[in-house]
Amino acid sequence: MSKQIFAAVALASSALAVVAHADTAVTENTTVGGTGFIDFTNLDAQSAGVKTATSGTGLDVKRFYLIANHTFDDTWSANLTTDFNYSSTTSETQLFIKKAYLQAKVSDAFIARAGSADLPWIPFEEALYGYRYVEQVLLDRLKFGTSADWGLHATGKLADGMFGYAVSTIEGNGYKNPTRTKSLDWEGRVSFAPVKGLTAALGFYSGKLGKDIQGSTTPPLHTAQRFDALVVYAVDQFNVGGEYFTADNWTSVTSAAKDSANGYSVWAAVNFTPTVAAFARADSDKPNKDTAPTKKEDYFNVGVSAKMRKGVDVALVYKHDEVKNNSVTATKYDEIGVWTQVKF
């Protein structure tokens, strides 16, 4: 615990030491923007062969982010990003703070943030994948990671962007729950881009996932760990990539029994013109290798997309997902429709 605190304080202190004499040439400026994910689809969802209540045709606003950025000077800036979504549990729309941080940019090689900010892995992969509005990337879709959390963050690029890194020390609850914890979690990434379009990256996570809370009746019994590997080659004509992960105790931090998981995701997209593309993706994972060794999930999507204008992307997509136990289908869904991304 003391080592974790010392490392977090050292991260914050190094940022403050370097930016103490920041250049203040830039005039203060505030910008406001947004990103929305909207779909209109038909969904056929089944559990044990019986159609579920989520089946049917309808319109969803899966996410809508309102983003405010304020620049103080060359070094200092701040960000506030709200997150709107719909909760099927409460049958109500909900509004969260996704990102709220103060940033100090010393150089491209060192950027420090304090607050709720992007974590090292999922946002990095989303930018390379390019179809987040159609589907979350593998770890986000399976809930073996999240895109933002509260804590201290550092990131940067070196050698004209050939090398990159990011590290965060966080509370582990995700951005929706800023509860103070007894120990801090760690997530990190290193990346290498030797030639234009080619990116390789390795990542890790270690911690209690926000469950190490003072006085909790279900204290953590294990440490969750995750390791990630990613290779992407993206040029104007096409984008191909793949990710592999392995995790220990992600679903059993407070359980007596240990558990593990692994999985992969591969994708490809072909750009026929600057505005029209076809894409496909396939995921496969074993989410509970120890506690449910015969359980396996397979997912794929295929579609075509078009840039209708700047800031508006539309995709016609078919999705299929199936979870099996002992080769017997437990749950599955088929979905077809139109997915849209709006940015301004």
Image (cartoon, helix red, strand yellow):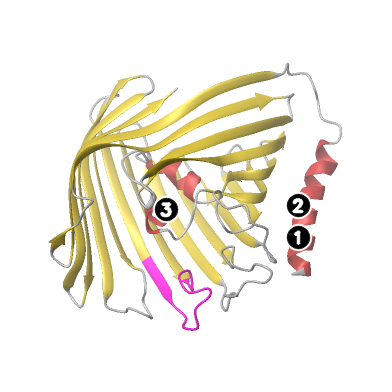
The segment highlighted magenta reads 248-262
- Disc 1 marks a residue whose amino acid type is Ala
Q: Secondary structure at mark 2?
A: helix
Q: Of the residues tagged 1 and 3, which is closer to the observer? A: 3
Could you say where residue 75 lies in the image, as x and y percent from the top left? 74, 30
Which image quadrant for residue 103? top right
Mark 2 sits on what residue? 11
Is 323 left, or right, of 183 in this rendering? left
Mark 1 sits on what residue? 7
For image coordinates 46% across by 83% down, the residue present is: 257
Q: Give 282 or 260, whichever is nearer the viewer.
A: 260
Pointer 1: residues within 10 angstroms few (<14), some, or many (20+)? few
Could you say where residue 337 lies in the image, as x and y percent from the top left? 19, 38
| 161 falls in the magenta region | no
Magenta part mainly helix, strand or loop?
loop
Could you say where residue 192 lies in the image, as x and y percent from the top left? 53, 49
Q: Earlier in the sequence, mark 1 or mark 3?
A: 1
- Disc 2 marks a residue whose amino acid type is Leu
| 252 falls in the magenta region | yes
Mark 3 sits on what residue? 140
- Disc 3 marks a residue whose amino acid type is Asp
> Which residue occupies the extreme top position in the image?
27
